[in-house]
Amino acid sequence: MSKIEVDQITQQSGSTLTVGGGACKTATVDATTVTIGRSGGTVSLASGATQSGFGRTGTVDWQTGSIKTANFDAVSGQGFFCDTNGGAFTCTLPSGSAGAIVSIQDYRNTFDTANLTVTPQSGEKINGGDGSVVLSTEGEGITLVYIDSTIGWRSIQDNDFSKIGSTFINATGGTITSTPTCRIHTFTGPGSFCVSAVAQTPANNAVGYLVVAGGGGGGQAIGGGGGAGGFREGRTDPITPYTASPLVTTGHTVSVQSYPITVGSGGSGVAPGSPGDGGDGNNSIFSSFTSAGGGGGAGNTRCGPDGGSGGGAGALRTGGTGNTPPVSPAQGTNGGNGGPVNANPVGAGGGGGATAVGGNGTQPASAGNCGGAGATTHITGSPVAYAGGGGGANQNSTPQPSGGTGGGGKGGMCSTATCMAGAANTGGGGGGSASGPVCGGNGGSGVVIIRYKIA
């Protein structure tokens, strides 16, 4: 064996200093302290070369070309995107050795509905405990490093990435439609508006909303028309631009949470028999916004009940008070008054609508006791009217009183003309019954609509 002892090797020419004998040779540097490189320099492995004994620096090579959708064995030094959209499955960690590292990330934000189980090799631990770890948070990502047999695999990072870096709101619930720039959630029954991510730009977290309550049912025996369900609308320009109703106010800013949605049903129309009031509509609710159910139409010689919009009155009496309880802008108007009891024919008051009071039952009874007009908004992307009052009944007179625009039902006429129900999911009031075997019309159910920016 040859041996050369020197204090320093210095390159004399060229830009490369080669130490070693080439292929199949081993160069050994034997010292207590070995320094490679210099301050500001770079130490690199040759192309295709591998290293051992140095451990990892805390990073992994992400396997973007192999999305995992079923049980698999992880490899140290690699990161895996796991898609549980098709169902839960298991990731088995490699055998632990000091410095081994594995990362896992929820690919489609579905770990909350279909979990990923991370399992160590037999006899090994995760975070010092025996058994597996279940990832069950939407968008969760985790990095594990193997330390020793006491702790096993230690999670050095565990984050929920579904809520980071969002440009716009991400939400579910109701029937979802879109315009080129906005998404719209329409609830025609109870449900939840679930916000899973909000925008980095706070202004983009403002939503437009429409909350319409159930309309009141029509009264019986020259009965008043049912009042429309309360109408409340919010819009924030320029975040949720559209043509709103005259009753619009400022929109609402949402956060990551689930917002319960209540959609009020319409009140029942009065069945044939003694004079009676139609049933009040039921409230609709989104967040802090409650729209009150419409007041039921009154029976003959009875006052109209109060509500989001007031119910129409019977003969001689006054209509119900709208915007009850009061909010600003007003959610509805008053019901119409009943005509004089000695008038022939007699007319009952129409139910109040979102933007116009119900017609009075003046003498002679005619179309003057129509339901009050509702309000039109483009929140869904096209113009739709909501919250029209129901028409009051006429006694032996034509024409049949119409309901207010926005789903109000027609009032009854004579003893046989059928009064009409308020239209479903408009909050329209039901028409009042004239007399005899004809029922008062049922009030229309309400609706809740939420709109927000997506582009």
Image: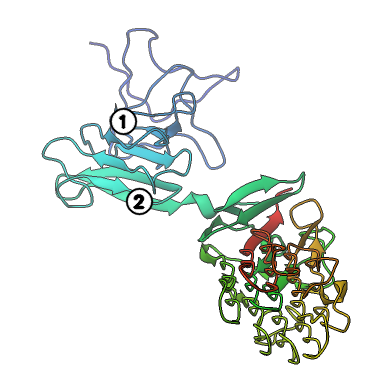
**Mark 1 nearby-residue class (10 Å; few <14, some 14–19, many ≥20):** some
**Amino acid identity at mark 2:** Ile
Q: What percent of the width, then of the height, locates residue 453?
A: 72, 54
- Nearest the eye: 314 or 446: 314
Nearest to the eye among marks 2 and 1: give it: 1
Q: Is residue 83 above or below residue 262?
A: above
Residue type, numbered disc 1: Ala
- Label ID, residue 285: none
Q: Residue at (53%, 22%) from the top-left corner?
A: 11
Residue at the top extreme of this rendering: 23
- Residue 286 visible somewhere in the drawing: no
* Disc 2: CA contacts within 10 A as few (<14), some (14-19) or many (>=20): few
| Element assignment for label 1 | loop
Residue 25 versus residue 40 in the image, above or below: above
Identify residue for label 2.
156
Secondary structure at numbered mark 2: strand
Task: Find the distance from the CA under tag 2 to the CA under tag 1.
Answer: 17 Å
Up-down relation of residue 409 to residue 163 (above or below): below
Given residues 93 and 289, the one toward you in this image is 289
| Residue at the extreme left | 123
Which disc, if any, is residue 74? 1
Question: x%, y% of residue 96?
Answer: 21, 36
